[in-house]
Image (cartoon, grey):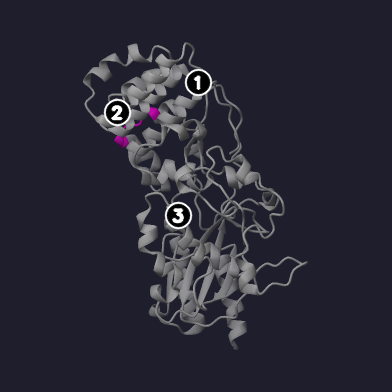
Amino acid sequence: MNADVRQEELRQELHALGFDEVRFARVAGAAPGAEALRAWLDGGLHADMAWMERTAEKRAQPELGLPGAQSVILLGVNYWRDEKRKAKGAVQPVWARYALHDDYHDTMKAGLVAAGKAIEKIFGAGGTDYRYYVDTGPVLERGWAARAGLGFIGKNTMLISRRFGNWLLLASILTKLEFVPDAPLMKKSERRKAEGESNHVGLLCGKCTRCMDECPTGALPRPGVLDARRCISYQTIENRGMIPRELRPGIGTRIYGCDICLDVCPWNRFARTARSVLLAARGEIAELPLRELLELTPARFAEVFRGTAIKRVKLAGLLRNACVVAGNSGDTGLLEPLVRLAAHASPVVRAHAVWAVFRLTDSAEKILAVARAAETEAVVLEEYAAALNVQHSTLNVQRPSPTPNTNY
């Protein structure tokens, strides 16, 4: 059996395992996107994600991750499901679509273990001839995926597939085996070199800038450039501290992550419901009322979010996010749990609860008097001072109106 036939056999076997896209790229020089990564880091656009700096060289040079690496196998798993909900009387928190599953890092890993066995069986390779990652290793997956023709890098910085839109979770396998590389996407009207073409931001976006225009916090200053410091996903997941006050209103009802720059993309007309071979849907999470989230206990948090990616933010992080959503909700019925959270053990939770109470009522100073008298943490006292300054400097502080449900 020749190499090309074995490669196609592997492609079919990986597809049967649950990977919706299986493409191959050849390692030659620096990884696609390495220069852009360095510029992004130099500009400080990665916020406090220091691990991005620590792994930058490995991302740029695959051989540092696997000495002798010759190829990268790019794998995509479609995770789109129609999660539209009927409008309800109360504001319903909105979760990033990928979060409404068991943690894909865990469920996709099972597929990668099986993929490794398939490589060994078909090519006679050993366990040291490949290394796999699910979105967390030092690999520039989107750049490699674009080089392999799995999609193109959109102006929203995401990999956009012509078959699945914006809804692919990526995994990669570095290997010492040589594979015939798949061709990158190209415009019919242009004849660029393949590797140059694969990194062309907005290759098939045309004049569309919906992703940039719709971002409520201005996190996409230029096509293909994300300022993590202003990104709702970063602020609600990666940031474990205070969410900047000026960004909180733009977060709206998004409690964990954000899909706006994905949702608005016209390429999603090709989205299709996931096979879910390597995913386990947890759609019930989307139905959790905001009040219940504000009243989460450690035991209830562990019970509800066990096995999901949401557990990463821990209870304090989710309560912080819930406070922001409550402050944007216009729902004064949430004042009771918010006042309780103003006395929470975490200063970060207390600070955001204070912000939310002041957003919802002109009586905030009065109903928070006991909590304020007991407060000693500087970060929370600063929140009180800022809120009081706003309240006292205007005769009529505009309260947020109840935020309608969206499909974002």
Specify the amino acid type for callout 1: Gly
Upstream in the sequence, badge 2 or badge 1? Answer: 1
Upstream in the sequence, badge 3 or badge 1? Answer: 3
| Above-or-below relation of 9 to 369 | below
**Spatial separation of the CA atoms under disc 2 and disc 1:** 22 Å
User: At x 44% / y 73%, what residue is drawn?
Assistant: 61
Q: Decide: few, some or many residues near mark 2? Use Cα within 10 Å; few <14, some 14-19, many ≥20.
A: many
Location of residue 383 (image quadrant) = top left
**Mark 3 near mark 2, Cβ–Cβ under 8 Å?**
no
Image location (x, y in percent) of residue 374: 22, 20
Nearer the observer, 392 or 159: 392
Q: Secondary structure at mark 1?
A: loop
User: At x 42% / y 20%, what residue is drawn?
Assistant: 390
| Above-or-below relation of 222 to 13 | above
Q: Decide: few, some or many residues near mark 1? Use Cα within 10 Å; few <14, some 14-19, many ≥20.
A: many
Q: Secondary structure at mark 2?
A: helix
Image location (x, y in percent) of residue 6: 58, 82
Nearer the observer, 225 or 131: 225
Specify the amino acid type for callout 2: Val
Q: Is residue 344 visible?
A: yes
**Mark 2 near mark 1, Cβ–Cβ under 8 Å?**
no
Farthest bottom residue in view: 1
Image location (x, y in percent) of residue 358: 40, 19
Image location (x, y in percent) of residue 193: 66, 75
Nearer the observer, 36 or 74: 36
| Label ID, residue 380 | 2
Nearer the observer, 300 or 232: 232
Please report the bounds of the magenta region as a residue range: 294-299
- What residue is pinned by disc 3? 43
Q: Quadrant of the N terminus?
A: bottom right
Q: Decide: few, some or many residues near mark 3? Use Cα within 10 Å; few <14, some 14-19, many ≥20.
A: few
